[in-house]
Amino acid sequence: MFATQLSVFVENKTGRLSEILNTFSEHHIDIRALSIAENSEFGILRLIVSETERAYDILKREGFIVKKTEVLSLQMEDKPGALAQLVDKLSDAGVGIEYLYAFVSREDGGANVVLRLDDTEAAQNLFK
């Protein structure tokens, strides 16, 4: 399934992440998944949220630099080798992975992976 991810530019200073998370809390927006990539000056907070468009508008209004990105979100068994099989399938089809993050679902006990790919159309055909 394809999902829209929010990517938020975050200054690497104390309190910025807290500000974003509290903004979501105040507006009752649920965070489904998140990842942070950072360097010494800034970070990129990547999120899947319950109300993407509303969250995007709120972050923009609050002055954050935010971008929407299409990502592939897949469920798989939570067992050794499941992610390797998924990555092999993409690799064999010539689809490159720009980045990914994974988490275990409390609802179904399965694992979930969010992937940003260089060819979403090929991946969509692969996982129909």
Image (cartoon, rainbow, N blue to C red):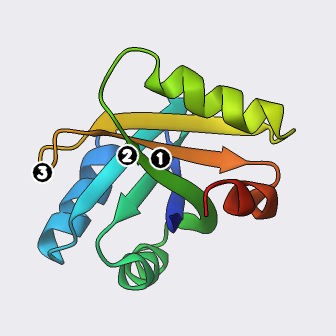
User: Between marks 1 and 3, how big is the CA–CA gap?
Assistant: 24 Å
User: Between marks 2 and 3, how big is the CA–CA gap?
Assistant: 17 Å
User: Between marks 2 and 1, how big is the CA–CA gap?
Assistant: 7 Å
Say what secondary structure mark 2 lies in.
Answer: strand
Three-letter code, disc 2:
Leu
Looking at the image, the residue that sits furthest to the top is 80
N-terminal-most mark, 2 or 1: 2
- Position above or below: 27 against 46: below
Name the side, left or right, on which 13 lies relative to 117: left
Tell me whether the residue at label 2 lies in contact with that at label 3, contact meaning CB atoms closer than 8 angstroms.
no
N-terminal-most mark, 2 or 3: 2
Residue at 26% in and 58% down: 31
Which residue has dot 1 on it? 45
Say what secondary structure mark 1 lies in.
Answer: strand
- At which x and y percent is residue 7? 54, 57
Residue 41 seen in this snapshot: no
Tell me whether the residue at label 2 lies in contact with that at label 1, contact meaning CB atoms closer than 8 angstroms.
yes
- At which x and y percent is residue 95? 81, 42
- Position above or below: 25 against 101: below
Q: Residues within 10 Å of mark 3 (few under 14, many from 20)?
A: few
Which residue has dot 3 on it? 107
